[in-house]
Image (tube, helix red, strand yellow):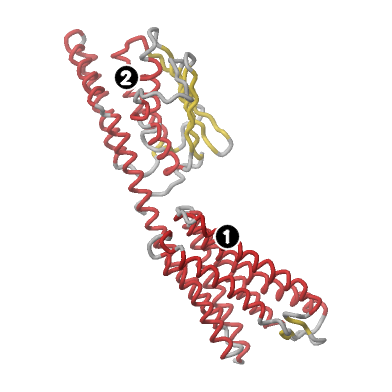
């Protein structure tokens, strides 16, 4: 096998490896989208960079109009992608610094974009001047007089990024400083080796090593991100659960059961069953890190409403319009919102009121609405009435974490309150944290 063919085969192998890394990072990118997809974009460019170089070497010297056109396009893409890869690495560095709060690094980041813009302009002009490369009548490519300007400016952009990483290293997450430094150092080492041993793809080899490093780091970051999300989710569920089994609620239920024992033992027995199922549902939710069928959440809510109906008698009326039921929802989503409607909307109203619970399709989402005609409240005014203690903020957070959904509240004094929860139709969006 000739030296040129060895280089071509090795670059095709490197391109395939980085393509696999890219695909993997895209798959896991949904857990930590911003940083993972930056790494995936960078790796995809590296893969294209090696692929275009290998194809360019393969068809270089092939005569004919079509090979000539194709070769010129491939070589232009190869050079352009190298500058875009520097831009993407620059964006990766900026994302890492921005997450840490290093806003002061932005001017330096912009300088890298300026450098890449200048060299891209030189590349375009070179198509007519031959500054970077040119072709002879046999369709063979030769490097031009300014060819060293191209890698020099790319390295300059990487060095600026490295300086920013060093200066603002205190803003980076643990281990990120070393990772970003190595991502810069390896291609520079490859360029130095390639200048000594020409026609050997040391740069692409080092870029592949960068890909392995980025892949491993991405897996570690994803695992850390999932652990953080799991902890946050558990804390919100514990907080919500505490509000659901508040002492005053249990005291009220037990007082009602005690009263019913004297006048209606059968109802008292039913109330005990409702309370036991209600408490069991709350405890089950504590260990639930996946979304659950909506029917289970409705069932749990009905146990709660059955308990409150015995306390408030004819004061609470509930109407259902469930057009969609076969979807998944985070546990303790519907019931806390209904409890808010009862406690802060209907109960303070002397004549009582109605709670409407409805579901309907809304594009690719399902809209769950909890509406009441209770006393309402002024959303512009912060009132210390204990609303937050029943977990509106926690429910919103869990809907975002577990289903990538949303929760909105609209209320008007004297009119009532509307809570809307949007979740994907297709089932549980967020996979098991432990998996």
Farthest residue toward the bottom? 2
Depth check, front residue: 382 or 211: 382
Q: Distance between the residues labelled 2 and 1?
A: 62 Å
Give x and y (percent) for residue 272: 22, 22
Viewer can see residue 392: yes
Name the residue beneath numbered marker 1: 107
117 left or right, relative to 326: right
Residue that appears at 24% across and 19% down: 253
Give x and y (percent) for residue 111: 61, 64
Residue that appears at 40% across and 31% down: 392
Residue that appears at 58% across and 77% down: 12
247 left or right, relative to 59: left
Give x and y (percent) for residue 7: 59, 85
Circle 2 Cα neighbour tier, 10 Å, few/some/many (<14 / 14–19 / ≥20): some
Name the residue beneath numbered marker 2: 306
Q: Is mark 1 on a helix, strand or loop?
A: helix
Figure quadrant of residue 299: top left
State if disc 1 and disc 2 touch (CB < 8 Å). Answer: no
Give x and y (percent) for residue 254: 20, 19
416 left or right, relative to 81: left
366 above or below 64? above
């Amino acid at each position: 096998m000739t030296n040129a063919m060895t280089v071509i085969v090795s670059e095709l192998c490197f391109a395939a490896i980085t393509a696999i890394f890219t695909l993997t990072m895209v798959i896991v990118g949904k857990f930590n989208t911003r940083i993972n997809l930056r790494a995936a974009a960078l790796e995809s460019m590296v893969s294209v960079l090696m692929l275009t170089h290998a194809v360019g070497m393969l068809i270089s010297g092939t005569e004919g109009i079509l090979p000539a056109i194709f070769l010129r396009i491939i070589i232009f893409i190869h050079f352009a992608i190298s500058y875009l890869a520097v831009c993407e690495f620059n964006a990766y560095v900026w994302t890492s610094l921005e997450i840490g709060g290093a806003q002061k690094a932005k001017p330096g980041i912009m300088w890298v974009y300026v450098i890449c813009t200048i060299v891209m302009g030189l590349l375009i002009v070179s198509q007519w001047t031959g500054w970077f490369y040119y072709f002879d009548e046999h369709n063979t490519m030769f490097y031009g007089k300014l060819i060293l300007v191209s890698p020099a400016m790319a390295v300059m952009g990487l060095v600026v990024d490295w300086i920013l990483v060093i200066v603002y290293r205190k803003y980076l997450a643990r281990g990120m400083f070393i990772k970003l430094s190595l991502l810069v150092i390896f291609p520079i080492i490859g360029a130095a080796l390639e200048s000594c041993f020409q026609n050997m793809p040391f740069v692409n080899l080092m870029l592949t090593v960068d890909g392995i490093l980025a892949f491993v780091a991405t897996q570690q970051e994803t695992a850390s991100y999932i652990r953080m999300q799991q902890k946050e989710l558990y804390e919100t569920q514990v907080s919500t659960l505490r509000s659901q089994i508040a002492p005053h609620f249990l005291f009220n239920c037990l007082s009602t059961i005690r009263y019913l024992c004297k006048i209606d033992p059968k109802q008292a027995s039913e109330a005990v069953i409702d309370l036991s199922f209600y408490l069991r549902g709350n405890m089950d939710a504590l260990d639930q890190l996946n979304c659950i069928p909506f029917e289970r959440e409705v069932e749990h809510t009905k146990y709660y409403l059955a308990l409150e109906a015995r306390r408030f008698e004819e004061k609470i009326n509930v109407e259902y319009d469930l057009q969609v039921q076969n979807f998944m929802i985070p546990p303790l989503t519907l019931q806390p919102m209904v409890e808010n409607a009862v406690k802060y909307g209907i109960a303070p109203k002397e004549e009582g009121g109605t709670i409407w619970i409805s579901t309907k399709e809304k594009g690719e989402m399902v809209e769950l609405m909890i509406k009441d005609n209770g006393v309402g409240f002024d959303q512009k005014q912060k009132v210390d009435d204990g609303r937050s203690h029943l977990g509106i903020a926690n429910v919103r957070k869990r809907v975002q974490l577990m289903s990538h959904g949303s929760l909105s509240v609209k209320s008007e004094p004297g009119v009532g309150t509307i809570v809307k929860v949007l979740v994907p139709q297709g089932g549980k969006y967020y996979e098991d944290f432990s998996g």
